Image (cartoon, rainbow, N blue to C red):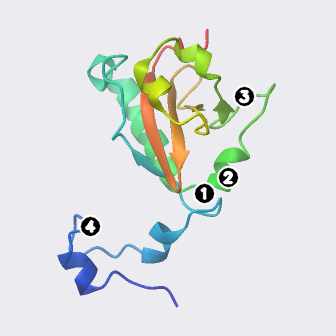
Amino acid sequence: MTKRINSQQKKAGKFINKNTDVNVDVFDKNGNSALVFISIKHIQPNYQCFSEWTKVELSKFWRFNNRLHNMTWQQVYATASKDDKRGLAYTVIPREKYGSNEFVSSLDKEIKMFELRVDDEIRVHGFRMNATFYLCFLDREHKICI
């Protein structure tokens, strides 16, 4: 039986919609079987901003967002491949690729930065903490890894 959000949790302001039907078990998972959640808390707007994206690119991002929210971390990791880039193509990116970016330099050395494919050219970069993907860089022209 799955737990539902109780009235105490609702009153504590843990969820935006008080009438949500979100399964609490999903939020409690930390392993690779957890569903992926995206946060833009650490997005670096000085590198690139959504305002620079076209309507078509934004539509692609929102499709990517919806797709990612329905995947587990195990499914994301399974898209990794050195040769045949397909799907999200999870790829760990060496920190040197970000140059002297202060934000990346400030992260704990144990945190792995990686990119995910939005489409054939557009990428997003970030890191994982528990079930959350912290999106840090928008890379609509795939320039970070050139």
**Residue 75, labelled with which disc?**
2
Residue 19 x/y as whole percent: 23, 76
Q: Earlier in the sequence, mark 3 or mark 4?
A: 4
Q: Given this view, does label 3 or label 4 mark the residue nearer the observer?
A: 4
Q: Is residue 14 left or right of residue 73?
A: left
Nearer the camera: disc 1 or disc 4? 4
Residue holding disc 1:
72
Q: Nearer the viewer, mark 4 or mark 2?
A: 4
Is 90 on the left-hand or right-hand side of 6?
A: right
Q: Sort mark 2 into few (<14), some (14-19) or many (20+) by Cα contacts within 10 Å.
A: some
Question: Mark 2 to mark 1: distance in Å?
Answer: 5 Å
Q: Quadrant of residue 102?
A: top left
For marks 2 and 3, give the CA distance: 15 Å
Task: Say whether marks 2 and 1 touch (CB < 8 Å).
Answer: yes
Residue 127 vs 117, above or below: the answer is: below
Residue 77 in the image: x percent, y percent?
Answer: 69, 46
- Amino acid type for the residue under numbered disc 1: Thr
Image position of 112 with respect to 104: above or below: below
The dot on residue 15 is: 4
Mark 1: give few (<14), some (14-19) or many (20+) Cα within 10 Å. Answer: some
Which quadrant of the figure has residue 144?
top right
Neighbour tally class for label 3: few under 14, some 14-19, many 20 plus, Cα within 10 Å: some
Q: Nearer the viewer, residue 107 or 86?
A: 107
The kind of residue on which mark 2 rests is: Gln
The tag earlier along the polypeptide, 1 or 4, is 4
Q: Residue at x 43, y 31 (%)?
A: 136
User: CB atoms at circles 3 and 4 under 8 Å apart?
Assistant: no
Q: Nearer the viewer, mark 3 or mark 1?
A: 1
Label located before the other in sequence (3 or 1): 1
Q: Amino acid at mark 3?
A: Lys
Task: Assign a secondary structure to mark 1.
Answer: loop
